[in-house]
Amino acid sequence: MSKRKPPGLKLRGETWHIDKVYRGVRIRGSCETSSLEIAIEVLEIEEEKIRRIQLHGVRTHHTFREAATYYLKTKKKRSLATDAWHFELVEPFIGNLVLEDIHDATLRPFIEYRYASQVKPKSINATLELVRHLLNLAASKWRDAAGQTWLLQAPMISMEEIGDTSAKPYPLSWKEQSSLFSLLGKDLAEACEFKVNTGLRDEEVCQLKWAWEHEVVGYGISIFIIPGGMVKNAEDRLVILNQVAKSIVDQRRGNNSDWVFPSPRTGKPRYNLNNSCWQRSWRRAGLPVSGQWTRGVHNLKHTFGRRLRAAGVVFEDRQVLRGHTNGSITTHYSGPEILNLIEAANKVCQMRPEAVLRRVV
């Protein structure tokens, strides 16, 4: 059954408008809809605003930065470090905005920035979903000293369309890698060379912390263990350092940062490696920029996996080195087993003859 039109709503053309005095306060304005049910909801929201202000006083405004800080202080979950990373991504765009001003339009500059960095819609949606979750908490759970929620009503945050994800990875040949890396800046080149020698994902390299390095007692070697909250499969990840990766880590010791590969500009974690410099260098190196091949930094992870296979590394060791494991494995490896994995990882340090087969389009 459709709702009866309450006093104060008037249809002008095809749009409903409000003109009503409620609790001594006049409400006027367009509902921007031709639907009576939606117009009634808009009127009820406006009336509720007036009622709450008269009962509890003016609502305290909170910025996104305040809300994100409160979230990280009060939330308890394994992936909190990942949430903090997403907040750092979006904070330059909406950090100073009060929660009432956060909606699709004010989030658009962030979305366009991420697209310009060649980030896929799925990754952008991960940040948007966290922002939406925070706003829902502010409108339903978090309350100020007067008992009012931080936000009267959470906006509907739209997600980006995923679209076609059929582009195939493009593992690099040694010649292509040499050409590409020679065009990158020194800092980015080191991070990418570390990635192609460890098989880490983009965010795992950017977030890699010195605190995650562990000595293998009695063997004079070290490994990194990335907490499960930072890993795609939510399991702690063992990071084996071959000769090249170890050399890069040793060169970066004492960089006065909590992170191994911080942004040289800010000293904080990088947003990503797949930035404009990478994209520009990819094109200048003559690598494919359209068609069936993807051109992101994730290709380095696929390059690592292909080289392990070409070098004859057994499947079980490849799974561990690429982080494709089931169950917590970081506490089950002995020193000799770690040495065996290092030996396997070292097989991708040297250039080998290779035949790369790709379909002609």
Image (spheres, rainbow, N blue to C red):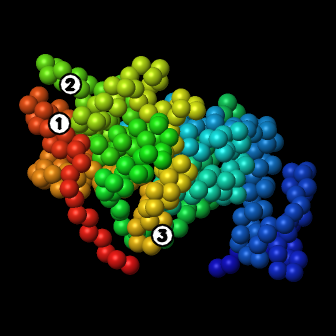
Q: Sequence order check: which comes first, mark 3 or mark 2?
A: 2
Q: From the viewer's perspective, is residue 154 above or below residue 53?
A: below
Which amino acid type is marked by label 2? Answer: Ile
Is 327 on the left-hand or right-hand side of 207? left
Which amino acid type is marked by label 1? Answer: Ile
- Disc 2: which residue: 221
Label 2 sits on a secondary structure element that is strand
Question: Which sits in the foreground, 314 or 327?
Answer: 314
Q: Callout 3 environment at 10 Å: few (<14), some (14 to 19), or many (20+)?
A: few
Residue 353 seen from this side: yes
Please state the horizontal and vertical placement of residue 108, each as a whole percent of the image: 66, 56
Identified at 68% across, 78% down, the residue is 2
Mark 1 and mark 2 in contact (Cβ < 8 Å)? yes
- Disc 3: which residue: 290
Q: From the viewer's perspective, is residue 336 above or below residue 169?
A: above
Please state the horizontal and vertical placement of residue 291, each as a whole percent of the image: 45, 73
Q: Sequence order check: which comes first, mark 2 or mark 1?
A: 2
Label 1 sits on a secondary structure element that is helix
